[in-house]
Image (cartoon, rainbow, N blue to C red):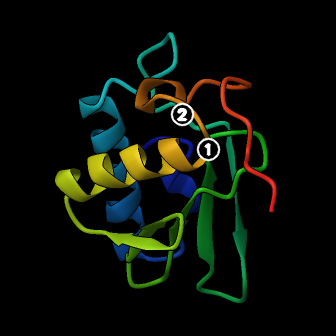
Amino acid sequence: MSKWTRMASTDAQEESIKTIESWMKSAGITTNRGEPGFAGGTTIGKHPQTVILDLHHQGSDFYVDRDGQIELDDKELRTLSDFKKQISISSKKFGCKPGEFFKHNKCKKIKG
């Protein structure tokens, strides 16, 4: 169990967090210790809560609802292909290359 799966209120959330971690590992998005490169995370709402995982400081990037639905930038993700596609879209939106999307201070959020 990772420190991120401990945030889960339901089995579906726990499985979805494990899925996100495996997608990140598959895409080479890890810390120097080989762990998924999350900057932080929190939960919101009443029990069961929604889990929010951050790629950047207070980024609120991934949302995992009580049923295990995964969203990144308000787009539902179901497969590794969905994940990679949304990372590419989000990277462009933030003005950076896909590999830089996860590196702190490399991309600036577009104002507007």
Disc number placed over residue 101 in the picture, else none: 2
For the N terminus, the quadrant is: top left
Q: Residue furthest top?
A: 32
Q: How many marks?
A: 2
How busy is the neighbourhood of tag 1: few (under 14 within 10 Å), some, or many (20 plus)? some
| Residue highlighted by disc 1 | 94
| Up-down relation of residue 87 to residue 70 (above or below) | above
Q: Nearer the viewer, residue 80 or 38?
A: 80
Element at label 1: loop
Residue 39 at x, y = what percent?
A: 67, 36
Instruction: Decide which of tag 1 and tag 2 comes sooner along the chain.
Output: 1
Residues tagged 1 and 2 counted as in contact (Cβ below 8 A): yes
Q: Nearer the viewer, residue 37 or 4?
A: 37
Direction from residue 94 to residue 73 in the image, left or right: left
Tag 1: amino acid: Phe
Residue 36 at x, y = what percent?
A: 45, 32
Q: Confirm whether residue 11 shows in the render.
A: no
Q: Confirm whether residue 43 shows in the render.
A: yes
Direction from residue 94 to residue 42 in the image, left or right: right
Residue 9 at x, y = what percent?
A: 54, 74
Element at label 2: loop
**Residue drawn at (73%, 49%) of the image:** 110
| Up-down relation of residue 31 to residue 110 (above or below) | above
**Residue drawn at (50%, 41%) of the image:** 91
